[in-house]
Image: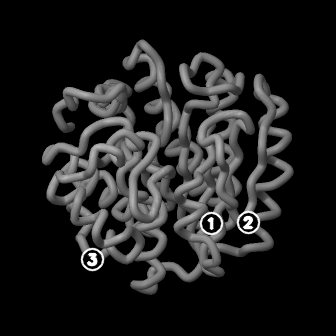
């Protein structure tokens, strides 16, 4: 946790509330504290000048406005660690089938600036590093946040080794969409059945056709009907069905899958945190079921 910046509208409270909710659940889990993402890993994807601005906590005001909050020294340290968390989750997933980063999912961050509450793009940086180190050769990024993963799409455009799949509310932020490997625009108010019908149409085919050896899952809970920034109408049960489906489809093919937290917004931060915690617990349970039964 970093102290809340004096300016900006983003609420950081949910991150520690998610951990507290996970601990209260009584579920068996192991907590890991990630190392900060090394500077050179960030610079392999982001503009070195922008990386330097963030690490010095000297981000120009116009970029901070795009991000949505000022980048203080504490925030600078935090985003390096949360980005390191996605890389660590991917490495752990290779050993355990599934692992979660209880933060990040910063899919709006672009080459030379942050945007939409995102500073560095952990999905793009992690993908680039895993492939560079030979830990993976083909990575599928499944982005089911209610907002399009425009930063991830633009940073990884043209990469034959990474496939970006974004399924999002058509009329939501960002106004100008990027081009993912596959974008699926959803109408306002789509419910559980309509959402799952669409996901079931695309995900199994992507896994079969692209044949990744690792899946990174941006598991935003903002498609929920009560989300303050969402435009879809999924229920608690609908989110769980979605998450279990993504895990099952990946793990039945023996693919490791790592999730990052992604979006979730509301006036009651405890309610949002519970939503995120239930998401991770459902995914971990589904992974255990597949490992124990093979189906």
Q: Residue at x 27, y 31 (%)?
A: 16
> In this view of the protein, can residue 251 be seen by the observer?
yes
Q: Residue at x 41, y 72 (%)?
A: 45
CA gap, disc 3 and disc 2: 31 Å
Residue with the mark numbered 3? 40
> In this view of the protein, can residue 26 be seen by the observer?
no
Judged from the image, the secondary structure of the residue bearing numbered disc 3 is helix
Residue 207, label in figure: 2
Q: Position of residue 126 (x, y in %)?
A: 42, 67
CA gap, disc 1 and disc 2: 8 Å
Q: Position of residue 134 (x, y in %)?
A: 45, 86
Residue 140, label in figure: 1
Q: Is residue 97 left or right of residue 268?
A: right
| Up-down relation of residue 49 to residue 89 (above or below) | below
On the rendered image, what quadrant is the C terminus found in?
bottom right
Mark 3 vs mark 1: give the one in front.
3
Judged from the image, the secondary structure of the residue bearing numbered disc 1 is strand
Graded by Cα atoms within 10 Å as few (under 14), some (14 to 19) or many (20 or more), the crowding at tag 2 reads some
CA gap, disc 3 and disc 1: 23 Å
């Amino acid at each position: 946790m970093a102290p809340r910046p004096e300016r900006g509208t983003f609420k950081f409270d949910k991150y520690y509330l998610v951990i507290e909710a996970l601990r209260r659940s009584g579920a068996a889990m192991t907590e890991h504290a990630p190392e900060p993402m090394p500077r050179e890993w960030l610079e392999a994807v982001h503009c070195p000048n922008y990386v330097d601005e963030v690490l010095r906590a000297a981000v120009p005001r116009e970029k901070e406005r795009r991000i949505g909050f000022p980048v203080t020294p504490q925030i600078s340290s935090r985003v390096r660690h949360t980005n390191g968390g996605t890389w660590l989750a991917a490495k752990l997933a290779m050993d355990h089938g599934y692992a979660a980063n209880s933060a990040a999912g910063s899919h709006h961050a672009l080459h030379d600036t942050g945007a939409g509450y995102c500073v560095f793009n952990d999905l793009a940086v992690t993908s680039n590093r895993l492939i560079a180190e030979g830990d993976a050769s083909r990575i599928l990024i499944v982005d089911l946040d209610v907002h399009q993963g425009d930063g991830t799409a633009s940073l990884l455009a043209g990469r034959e080794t990474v496939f970006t799949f974004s399924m999002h509310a058509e009329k939501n932020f960002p106004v100008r969409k990027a081009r993912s490997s596959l974008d699926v625009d959803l109408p306002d108010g789509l419910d559980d059945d309509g959402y799952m019908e669409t996901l079931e149409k695309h995900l199994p085919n992507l896994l079969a056709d692209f044949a990744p050896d690792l899946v990174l899952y941006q598991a935003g809970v903002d498609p929920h009907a009560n989300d303050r920034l969402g435009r879809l109408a999924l229920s608690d049960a609908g989110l769980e069905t979605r998450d279990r489906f993504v895990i099952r489809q990946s793990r039945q093919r023996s693919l490791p899958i790592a999730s990052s937290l992604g979006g979730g917004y509301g006036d009651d931060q405890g309610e949002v945190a519970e939503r995120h915690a239930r998401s991770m617990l459902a995914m971990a349970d589904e992974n255990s079921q597949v490992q124990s039964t093979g189906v």
